[in-house]
Every structure is written in C-alpha cells, then in structure tokens.
Amino acid sequence: MSNPKHQAQSDALAQDILRGADTGRRGMFHVAAWGAATAMAAPGVAMAQAPAPAPAAAPAAAPRRSILTKDDSRLLNIGATVRSGRYWEFTTWQTPVEQFYVRNHYPTPNPEARPVLDRRNWRLRIHGNGIERELEIGYEDLLRMPARSLLATMECHGNARTIFWEQLGMRDVTGGNWVMGAIGLAEWRYVPMSHILGLVGLKPTAKACLFWSGVDGADMGRPLPIRELIERGDDIGICYQMNGNDLHLDHGAPVRAFVPGYGGAASTKWLTEIKIAEHNFWTRLNVTGEVFIGPSFTAPRPEPGDEFRGATAEQIRGPMVEWMPVKSTLTVPLVIEHSQSLPSNYPLQRGQLPMLSAGPQTMRGYAWGPQFGLAKVEYRIDGGAWQEARILAPNLGRYTWARFEFPWNATPGDHVIETRATDTRGTTQPAEVPFNLLGMANNAIPRFRIRVA
Ligand SMILES: Nc1nc2c(c(=O)[nH]1)N[C@H]1C(S)=C(S)[C@@H](COP(=O)(O)O)O[C@H]1N2
Ligand SMILES: [Mo]
C-alpha cells in the first residue's frame, strides 16, 4: 500500500528531523491560528507505510529511520524508542493511529524474529493459583469470544513530565521530555476479562493479576490489583483492535492488555501470559519504574510468598502509579526553557514562544479525568479570573476526553494562558504536585506562554 512518492517525501522529512533541520512545520506558529492543517496532515501521506528498518545494515554514525513500523513523521521524537503525538496539531476527538503516541521500552519487536507475534502462532496462557482452571487460547479462539468496544484515552504516566522542569523547578526529575502528547483516544475492541474470569473461575482468595509479555524485553509486563478485575471486568480486557482495525504492531499486535483509565503501562503490549495468583507480583514496572518515588510517598512492602520477576524486594522504591489524574492541555506547544532535552523535532527552539496573530482567536484544547469523567474546564489569561471554557460534544464521561474552546481577543505582547479541568467528583487540577523522581502523573495546571504580534 506504500505510495512511493509519499514514501520519498516522508523519508526526506524523517532525514530532516534526524538532522534537526527546520521542516517547515516549525513555521506554522507564525501564521494566524493553530487550527491550520499543514501539508503533512494530508491523509495520503499519513497512510504511507514506512519500510521495515534495517538497523544492522546502517553504519553506527548514520541516522536510523525509526524503531516503529508505522510512519513516524507525524509524531514527535522523544527518545530512542519513544514517539509522542504532536498534540498542538490534534483536531479530532478520536486519535488516528498514525498520530497516536508510542511508548516502547524496547524497539517494536519484529514478527519475523519473534514468530510468537504471528497471529497463526500467538498463544495466551492464563494460569495461576488464583483461578480454578488454566486456559490456553490462540488468536482464532480469541476472535470467537464475546467482544466489547470502548472509547477510551490511553495516557503514559510520563505525560506532562516537562512541567516538572518548566514550571515546578524540580530539576532532579528524570525521564523523557513528553510535553503533553503522550495521550490519545481510541476505540478499543477486546474480550472482557469478566468473560475470561467466568471461564477460568476466579477464586475468592485471588490477590493479584499479572499481564505479561516478555517478547519485546524479558522484563516487560505489569501487575494489576485484583480489585480492578472484579470491579471493572467488563472494561478491562484482551484487546486486538484499535479504531476498527487490527491492532498495529507498534501498539502491541496481535494482542495487548487493555486497562482503561490506568496509565498506559498497565496495558501490556504483545501479551502472552496472564497469571492470577494468591500472592502479589513484583516486576520492574512496579518496583523501580512506573512508581512514585519521593518524600511524599511510602514504598510498599512485599509479603511472604510474593512472586518476583526480574526484580527484588530490596529494589521496591515506591507505590505503583495507577489511575491517571484529571488534566487539560491547550493545543499549543509549551515553551521549553529549563528542560535538559528538547524533542529533536519540536516545533519551537529552546526558549522560543509560539506566535499568534493579534485579534479574535479561538483557543482550543483537550481535557480528561478518566476515573470519573470530565465536568468542567476553566482558563485564565495573564493571571486574571478563571472563566469557563465551552466543552464540545462528544463528552462521554468516564475514560474519554473532551475538546474545549474559548474565544480570546489576543492583544500584542506576551501572554500566559492556564487551563484547569475538574472531574465529576469535583477534583480540580492543582497548581503544584509533589516531587516524584520519575516524573509520573503530573497534572499541575499547565501554563502556555504565547507571543501575540
Ligand atoms: N510489552 C510492552 N508493553 C507495553 C510497553 C512496552 O514497552 N512493552 N509500554 C507500556 C507503556 S509505558 C505505555 S504508556 C503503553 C503505550 O501504549 P502505545 O505505545 O500503544 O501508545 O504501552 C505499555 N505496554
Ligand atoms: Mo508509559
């Protein structure tokens, strides 16, 4: 399906990006409004498939095209295996797969090297002493089971980590510079865990569930508290489609776990094993990674009989991050001044402000509160009074985000716009969040600096 002309264009663009060259998109903030789509937003280009990367053939010094199998020219390069959505270009409620962020701890595994990822070979083992009967299924078995579709955001714990450096002065926070684009909303199709639990018979003594891959990296998988399976067994599941198509390889094909509302790390890609046990699980992703580490947090203690996979009891650094908090963003690139790194194809240079033309403007953004649903979005300009923004339909409550907008008569000069969301339980984004070393789940009110001319 690859269009050679588009491929050449997107390869040329990727080379520009790798060289840090001005791609032209950088210039879009000097035009009248952010809503303007660029040439790259043409669907034909977006659908162009990148060729499989051939890292072995590339000399060490040459730039590598990508670690993804999808064309990453519409994504932001956050790190070696990590790509963010260009959230300032988002206009749709549902995020197209090609604009959807990819958070990989390792490169996307290749089914040629890992035959287990071939749909014909894929097997999922569901076992452990927390269930009555072990079950092993293949892909065709999965497709024959009752399925559900759910519209939900997926957000990386590291989304908005930038704000620790830019606004909160917490320079010791470590991790990739995600800004605000490590989130998207998709329609996920999955076999609900409630169905699986019915087949395997959940014991009342079950304590924890482990979703495990081990395919892209030997330590890839994460535990889920059993209460989530019990309370949300219809919403959590074994997922094989995203936005109506088979799951993309970069997003975990053929099958991934799906845990809406929790940070993305709960949704193990390239899933091969589910273990449900009468003991807790400790893995890298709830021991040294994807946990809250800092003076405001207390590390949990393991219990006798707990299971350790690629982690030890001594390594447990803090409580695991679970639900993503209520949050909002304008579709405006945040000014990056203090962060150690800038994404290599960020539309702004260090310290540069996005530009907007003076006059009446419509400011747009996204807000979400996955646990209880979004109730309200407010904004204020230059520290003035908080005013309510208009929330656009659809706003489907729990798990989804909503777009919002408000008019702004932009006057020449530099301005600061802040946004804050409130969920249906009345929880509002705070001005500050406590320090945590890995920069997890930051939902401090973002401050967007804009130069109007
Ligand atoms: N096997 C595996 N599963 C994984 C990861 C990974 O690196 N390997 N990354 C996790 C993290 S941290 C996030 S945020 C989500 C990202 O999902 P996406 O790349 O489909 O957006 O996948 C999760 N599942
Ligand atoms: Mo993540």
Image (tube, rainbow, N blue to C red):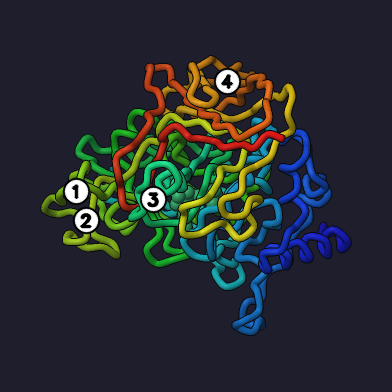
Q: In what element is the residue under mark 4? A: loop
Tag 2 residue = 316
Q: Which residue is rendered at x = 27% and y = 44% of the image?
A: 208
Tag 3 residue = 211
In x, y percent, where is residue 370?
A: 45, 29
Considering only vertical position in the picture, is 310 above or below 372? below
Cα–Cα gap, marks 3 and 4: 30 Å
**Which of the 4 image quadrants contains residue 204?**
top left
Q: Which residue is rendered at x = 66% and y = 81% of the image?
A: 58
Identity of the amino acid at label 3?
Phe
Pointer 3 or 1: first along the chain: 3
**In this rendering, does residue 302 appear at all?**
yes
Cα–Cα gap, marks 2 and 1: 6 Å
Pointer 3 or 2: first along the chain: 3
**Structural crowding at the residue carrying mark 2, measured as other residues with C-alpha within 10 Å and reported as few (<14), some (14–19) or many (≥20):** many
Eye-nearest disc, 3 or 1: 1
Left or right: residue 309 versus residue 252 is left
Left or right: residue 18 versus residue 79 is right
Identity of the amino acid at label 4?
Asn
**In this rendering, does residue 254 appear at all?**
no
Single out the residue that lies furthest toward the left.
304
Q: Which mark is residue 395?
A: 4
Cα–Cα gap, marks 3 and 2: 19 Å
Considering only vertical position in the picture, is 333 above or below 64? above
Question: How many numbered marks appear?
Answer: 4
Marks 1/4 in contact by CB < 8 Å: the verdict is no
Tag 1 residue = 299
